[in-house]
Amino acid sequence: MKQFPFTHMKKKQMMNVFFSLVSVSFMLFSPLAMADNPLWICPGGPYEGTVGQPVHFYLDIQGGMLPYHVLWDFGDRSTSTVRYADHVYVKAGNYSVKAQVTDGAGNTTMQYTSVRIYNLLDISIMTSPPYYIHDVYEIGVAIQGGKPPYKQYWDSDNDGLYDDAVGETIHVSWDAVGSYVIAVKVIDNRDSIDYASASITVIVRNEEPLIPSRPMGESKGKAGQSYAFTTSTEDPNADDVYYRWDWGDGTLSEWMGPYPSNATCQTEHDWQEKGQYAIRVMAKDTMGAESAWSEPFVVTMPYHHQSSPESCVMRLLSFLFERYAWMYR
């Protein structure tokens, strides 16, 4: 029959073992022993984290008597009783964190640490259209959140490799119209990474129409009668154009058109009063770019005499006197 380990020991031997165990326990857990090995804790830190992501807190405990009772206060009205605690903050800021430990003998100690919580890294490319071929542009990136300083890596040829430039901005230029993609990768001081891209449309720079030709038409006329005048111009971008006339009498026409580039514009005008009038014309393309005024064309409206019956009689008598003056000699 199987015997227990101590059944073969004599009674005196068993008593010696018992008193030895009691003696060891007394040395380990007596107040005097506890005084030589006081409770000590270290909550680590300072810590850093990001909004919405867990922060891992570590608590080092030494001395005292088991078991340990832990209480974390994370500074945002949240607590935990886990020694190695994970906590998620929902708002960026600086927080004071308290760790408190009570051991099996009722001894309590506490220590403070801190945690800095950053907003999520958020970036966007800053664009300012329009963009024209052959011009050089400086494009930057707006950065929010994360922990500075930042590192920026650019991709300007849309090959997926961020190796075209390093820094806060990139200088770019295009040799043809079309749509292009600029991308950037930003890494903050905590190795958080964010990406952004922007589509850029490149166009030909619009130029205003050339100054219209000097108006052409009758240079003399009668007041109250309409006369036709013509002009034309060329638009460097081959846009259609509108024309506005200055008739020299204080009136401007509405914008007339559109007319194709280099096509002739013809219109009419009449003047109600005698005098000289300087006619000018300007052009505007369909993009709104305006030319300067043309050279003036001067029109003269001569005096318009209305003869009275008395003046007609006097002219007739003068004619007869000159015709038959020999009769009165």
Image (cartoon, rainbow, N blue to C red):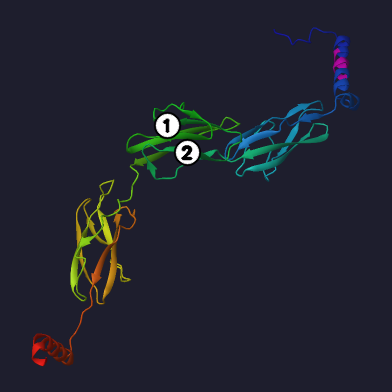
Identify residue for label 1. Answer: 156
Dividing the picture into quarters, in which one does residue 307 lie?
bottom left
The C terminus - image quarter: bottom left
Which residue type does callout 1 highlight? Answer: Ser
Q: In x, y percent, where is residue 291? A: 33, 54
Q: Identify the secondary structure beneath mark 2.
A: strand
Pointer 2 residue: 139
182 and 309: which one is in front? 309
Circle 1 packing at 10 Å, graded few (<14), some (14-19), many (20+), is many
Q: Residue furthest right?
A: 32
199 inside magenta stretch:
no
Reply above or below: 282 against 108.
below
In the image, which residues are magenta? 17-22
Q: Is residue 83 left or right of residue 215?
A: right
Closer to the camera, 214 or 252? 214
Residue at 68% x, 37% y is: 115
Q: Secondary structure at mark 1?
A: loop
Whole-percent x, y for residue 175 in the image: 35, 34
Amino acid beneath label 2: Ile
Q: Position of residue 49 (x, y in %)?
A: 62, 35
Q: Main secondary structure of the magenta part?
A: helix
Please provide percent x and percent y for residue 103: 79, 32
Distance from disc 1 to disc 2, alpha carbons, whole Å, reads 11 Å
* Quadrant in which the N terminus is drawn: top right
Q: Residues within 10 Å of mark 2 (few under 14, many from 20)?
A: some
Residue 106 visible in the displayed image: no
Residue lying at 34% horizontally and 56% vertically, measured from the top left: 292
Comparing 225 with 189, the one in front is: 225
Of the image marks 1 and 2, the number of the one nearer the N terminus: 2
Can residue 215 be seen here? yes
Closer to the camera in the image, 323 or 179: 323
Is residue 315 depicted above or below 37 in this figure? below
